[in-house]
Image (cartoon, coloured by chain):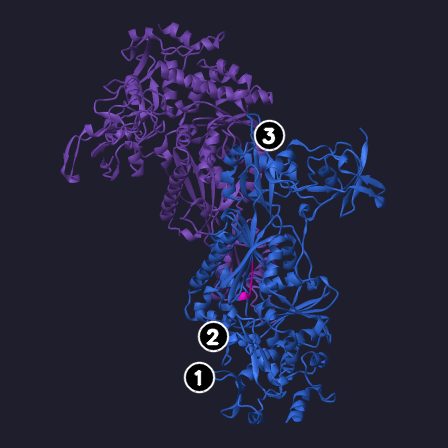
Chain colours: A blue, B purple
């Protein structure tokens, strides 16, 4: 018979095997990553490969499809059932007959990389906590007294090498006998983390789905994923129905404090919302509840506690003690989740500290500062800013009390980021006239059709990103001093600057229910941005660094804010603008990573254990940094670079902090 | 079709059912106590009822036998076989066609069983799976960001050395913060097997209770134990409420086979019974449900499967495949147990083989043959005899198909061991007159006051131990040949020996509804005892031994039978009578051991894995032994010793198996 040479691409792994060896066997011997659910029985179609055709000088061989055995019966059947693409073969049934270069397509790899849109982040290696295994089980005889479960375990050990598998959920145990007999001793099992059988189906079954949740104070977002491909099948979000108990976090905690026992009710509405959202995404994707076998959750500490049915009262005051800072694995049913399989497991990522939640743990998984030599500053802005700083050698985390100003709360014309809210603002430096964009329209307010497009929503207020831009633009237009005082003298130049008691306000929309920015609003933004800056600076002190290599703005706020304005305002430390990026919903991405890669769960547990938690409230330097950071803009090298990009006059090189005044003097 | 109204007497339970519903089904729906051995197949005749004829003003209905369906074929067959008394019907086949008042005669009711226990004293090393630990936990500070759970773990590790403790139930996690604060940073936790916190209380708490259950086919027994002292606080038993689905195991399995899906209902009534029993024992002992934190269960394979909610159909036929032969740990709530703490854990001992259950695993724990050098033969007699043989070097187990004769079933005057049943029999060798004892009285039938004491119950039949003694005494009195033929010649000496077709019967009580032993009864006992003996002998063959060092008779039957008579009949192999003991409810004791000693759970798991399972059905030698063992008494050395103690003439030393005949020749 002889033997032949085989090279697998893209890995380049190669070896010599006897003619007649199935390609999948060669791959396994060489530790080449080829997927299979059915264990090489020609059923699942996961092990497809392609044959390189031609001479490969690099490997000194000529490969041709002729060097594979002819199409086998199981391959023909599979082709009839599911259609093999031209050139594709099932590696479990195609045998080596001569030298071959084999291409393993991405979708045939077990640990396939799931490529993320943002170039700067790592791909996700597919290795879900729940895996399906098709297995043939020995039938019982009068001679063998072992139970069906034990014979199933033996088969899984032998056919899949699952040596750590010992346990089974009672619901699966109750179904095992009928499944084995219905499936004629062939069943598919779902195995959780290689240790426990959580579901069983007769015969071959290849549908396993998972959900990644980001439980935000305002919105709940979910991604429904196919656990075998890693693909996101549907994503959706709903308002957090807890809003009726208070719009911001502290109102909800206060509600519980004032109404002891009400946490169960607030947890209940959250869980209802989660079930509704699951129903929405699985309906959209056409996925049965029974195939949803896993779910992961991130959220800030208070959302985390509500989700788990833990009274969050302790998080409402110092010392802000978490019930736990470990990841939690439990049944979906224990969280009142009814829209998944009853066998579904849930993993809730760990919180880091009383103000630094599982959402930040998710952000860390997504941005992986712990894997880089570069020093990253990652900021997730909400009611509190959660701040992570560091690299592979050392990682720190803190929360900074920015308050709700960045979310549009406690701002005179402020509102949540919803349709009708102003989200972008530009102020003409000559006329001091504003133009703006509102959520729900792509047009600027001075473009034709704006009126028509916004008729249904109206312009109802200004959201966080809008306020940031308004304040920065006011500063750039000379309407604001560096120490944050609205310049009353400008009232002479524009009717938009109006007296407001002893101070002034800038009117964006003049009407009965006007939209304007007053002195108190400016102060709130100053306090918020100073808190954010001071928190970051405090961590930089701890790390003994003066600058960071990159800054990532995470969260809904981070993805809506124009990073330039964040630098103009001095919200974040000095950094080359091209290294300041927005990460979008990095927390949700972290939940998705934990869903698709079980090792990430162990990783984040150990990261959370080792991360240095810094409590800003007890650090004297935090106050110093905070006071220093009140001015607009704070002294930064980046500021001068930015000045160009936002078309801003050069500040006096001798007194960069006086840039605003310099400008004002020139203009006036 | 419409429906009709039915009232059951004496209970008075009533309801409305569709025309065509079998009366037994109505009774089950209404939880009316109607007996059934065959599971509603018209065979056993235990479910007989009578129809009230006339107008029942109290129930505002007119009942007439016309309101039942005409006599069915199975009823006609039963009538031909066993004669239905006038007016009697089989409730499993008589269907509702109009309004009815149904009288459930006393003998058709499931009588309240008298559950007797032996105070088994055995040293148990107290090491329960659930332990309470009182601990002082460090308070959180702003400097330490660890969760309360993690600080609790650290305290438990430091103060109790619980280094393997890592997990916590969600319910306990939900309570941890309030308990720590209410208890001023001192709490008590319940730790399951050193690995997981299952409950938490503020401050000091010292109440932890556990339950050991023996789920028998006929009765359920429970011991409520104090887990900190090991003391049994209360013990109680109830009839297994599944009896309404069939008196013996196979009837219940047959019921499930004929009514797919009904296993959930049968599991449900079992679990209801368990909850009722827990309520009884904890009320008796004055123990709160919340302090019951653990429970252990033993039972035969079918009870084991029903308990776990596993359809036992596979145990109804070859190859008798168990769903699992591993011990199972789960939450009490997963078994529908509501009368314990919701945090309670349950451990179900492993089954050994399809006919050798977790009850036998319990017997092994109780009798510990695996720890001795002596070779023990342990026999647990029920519908099947479960047999264990061996010592510390080697252990074997088998089940032998004795049938229900030893339990009084399939015996003409047989009944379950309940009040009114004859349980002891002596026959005067001269007069051939019997005297007997019945359950519920300590007096012999020839003692003064016997009539009065038994007036309430009457003498209703003969139970297993009574039959054994009757047959042995008949043999000893010369009424029976060694090959089991009732000697018709004796009719000349006593009117108690009467013709019975071509054979004879011995009348214990002559009356209209006489209590007697006929030739068929003798055959049933011979078959049962031969099966038991052959099973034991087969295991002895495997071990290559001719005799055993000790014999233990376990179970309710074992504790009621006089071991001497077991040897006279040749039920068990040759053994010095002083080494034949009765172990009482050894299975229940095993459950108690597993409750009080967690290591016993690991022990039994490994014993069950290593025990050699012998399937009698496929062993040719079993048949040989079986045939040899039919004679009474079987040749044994012990027999001659016994002869003295039971005052029996010495047999011919040359032909010990002819002892009976020798005696008969001498007497006649």
- Between marks 1 and 3 in the image, the one whose residue lies nearer the viewer: 1
Q: Can residue B667 be seen from the camera position used here?
A: yes
Residue B184 at what x, y percent from top left? 50, 67
Label 1 crowd (10 A; few <14 / some 14-19 / many >=20): few
- Asked if residue A299 is among those painted magenta in the image, a careful observer would answer yes
Q: Chain of mark 2?
A: A
Q: Chain of mark 1?
A: A
Say which residue label 3 marks.
B373
Say which element carries label 2: loop
Residue A570 at what x, y percent from top left? 65, 79
Say which residue label 2 marks.
A458
Q: Which mark is residue B80?
A: none
Say which element carries label 1: loop
Say if A603 sits above or below B224 in the image. Answer: below
| Type of secondary structure dominating the magenta stretch | strand
Please tell me how many numbered marks the rendered image carries: 3
Image-based side of B306 in relation to B597, left or right: left
> Which quarter of the rendered picture does the C terminus of chain A lie within?
bottom right
Q: Please report the residue visible at 49 percent of the width from the left and 92 percent of the height from the top.
A: A501
The stretch in magenta equals: A297-301
Earlier-in-chain disc, 1 versus 2: 2
Q: Which mark is residue A512?
A: 1
Image-based side of A624 in relation to B235, left or right: right
> Which quarter of the rendered picture does the N terminus of chain A lie within?
top right
| Distance between mark 2 and mark 3 Cα atoms | 92 Å
Identify which residue, B556 or A133, lies in the foreground: A133
Q: Please report the residue visible at 47 percent of the width from the left and 35 percent of the height from the top.
A: B587
- Asked if residue B655 is among those painted magenta in the image, a careful observer would answer no
Image-based side of B88 in relation to A364, left or right: left
Q: Can residue B574 be seen from the camera position used here?
A: no
Do tag 2 and tag 3 residues touch (Cβ < 8 Å)?
no
């Amino acid at each position: 018979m002889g033997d032949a040479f085989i090279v697998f691409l893209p890995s380049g792994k190669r070896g010599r095997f006897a003619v007649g060896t199935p390609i999948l066997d060669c791959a396994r011997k060489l530790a080449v990553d080829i997927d299979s659910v059915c264990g090489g029985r020609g059923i699942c179609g996961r092990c497809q490969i392609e044959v390189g055709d031609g001479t490969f000088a690099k490997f000194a061989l000529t490969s041709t499809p002729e060097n594979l055995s002819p199409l086998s019966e199981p391959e023909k059947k599979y082709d009839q059932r599911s259609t093999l693409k031209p050139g594709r073969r099932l590696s479990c049934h195609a045998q080596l007959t001569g030298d071959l270069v084999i291409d393993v397509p991405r979708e045939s790899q077990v640990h396939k990389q799931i490529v993320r849109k943002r170039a700067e982040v790592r791909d996700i290696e597919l290795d879900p906590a729940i895996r399906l295994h098709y297995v043939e089980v020995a039938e019982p005889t009068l001679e063998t007294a072992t139970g069906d479960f034990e014979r199933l375990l033996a088969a899984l050990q032998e056919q899949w090498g699952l040596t750590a598998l010992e346990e089974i959920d009672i619901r699966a145990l109750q179904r095992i006998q009928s499944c084995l007999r219905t499936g004629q001793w062939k069943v598919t099992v779902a195995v959780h983390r290689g240790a426990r059988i959580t579901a069983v189906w007769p015969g071959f079954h290849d549908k396993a789905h998972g959900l990644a949740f980001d439980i935000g104070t305002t919105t709940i977002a979910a991604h429904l994923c196919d656990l075998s491909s890693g693909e996101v099948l549907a994503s959706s979000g709903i308002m957090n129905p807890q809003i009726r108990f208070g719009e911001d976090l502290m109102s909800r905690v206060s509600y519980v404090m004032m109404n002891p026992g009400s946490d169960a009710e607030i947890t209940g509405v959250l869980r209802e919302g989660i079930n509704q959202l699951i129903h929405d995404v699985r309906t959209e994707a056409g996925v049965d509840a029974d195939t949803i076998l896993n779910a992961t959750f991130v959220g800030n500490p208070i959302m985390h506690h509500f989700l788990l049915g833990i009274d969050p009262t302790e998080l409402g005051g110092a010392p802000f003690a978490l019930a736990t800072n470990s990841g939690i694995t439990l049944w979906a049913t224990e969280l009142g989740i009814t829209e998944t399989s009853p066998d579904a497991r849930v993993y809730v990522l760990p919180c880091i500290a009383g103000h630094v939640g599982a959402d930040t743990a998710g952000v860390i998984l997504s941005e992986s500062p712990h894997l880089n030599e570069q020093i990253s500053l990652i900021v997730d802005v909400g009611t509190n800013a959660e701040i992570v700083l560091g690299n592979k050698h050392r990682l720190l985390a803190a929360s900074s009390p920015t308050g709700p100003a960045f979310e549009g709360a406690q701002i005179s014309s402020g509102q949540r980021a919803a349709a009708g809210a102003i989200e972008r603002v530009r102020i003409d430096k000559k006329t001091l006239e504003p133009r703006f964009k509102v959520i729900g329209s792509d047009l600027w307010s001075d473009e034709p059709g704006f009126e028509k497009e916004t008729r249904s929503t109206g312009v109802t207020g200004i959201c966080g990103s809008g306020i940031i831009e308004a304040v920065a633009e006011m500063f750039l237009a000379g309407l604001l001093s560096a120490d944050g005082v609205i310049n009353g003298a400008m009232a002479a130049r524009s009717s938009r600057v109006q007296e407001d008691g002893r101070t002034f306000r800038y009117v964006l929309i003049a009407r009965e229910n006007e939209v304007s920015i007053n002195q108190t609003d400016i102060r709130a933004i100053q306090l918020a941005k100073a808190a954010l800056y001071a928190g970051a600076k405090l961590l930089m002190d701890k790390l003994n660094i003066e600058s960071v290599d990159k800054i990532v703005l995470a969260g809904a706020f981070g993805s809506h804010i124009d990073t330039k304005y964040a630098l103009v305002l001095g919200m974040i430390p000095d950094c080359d603008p091209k290294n300041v990026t927005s990460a979008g919903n990095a927390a949700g991405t972290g939940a998705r990573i934990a869903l698709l890669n079980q090792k990430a769960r162990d990783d984040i547990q150990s990261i959370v254990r080792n991360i240095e938690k810094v409590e800003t409230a007890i650090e004297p330097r935090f106050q110093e940094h905070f006071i220093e950071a009140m001015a607009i803009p704070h002294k930064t090298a980046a500021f001068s670079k930015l000045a160009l990009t936002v078309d801003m006059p050069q500040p006096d090189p001798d007194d960069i902090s006086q840039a605003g005044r310099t400008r004002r003097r020139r203009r006036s």
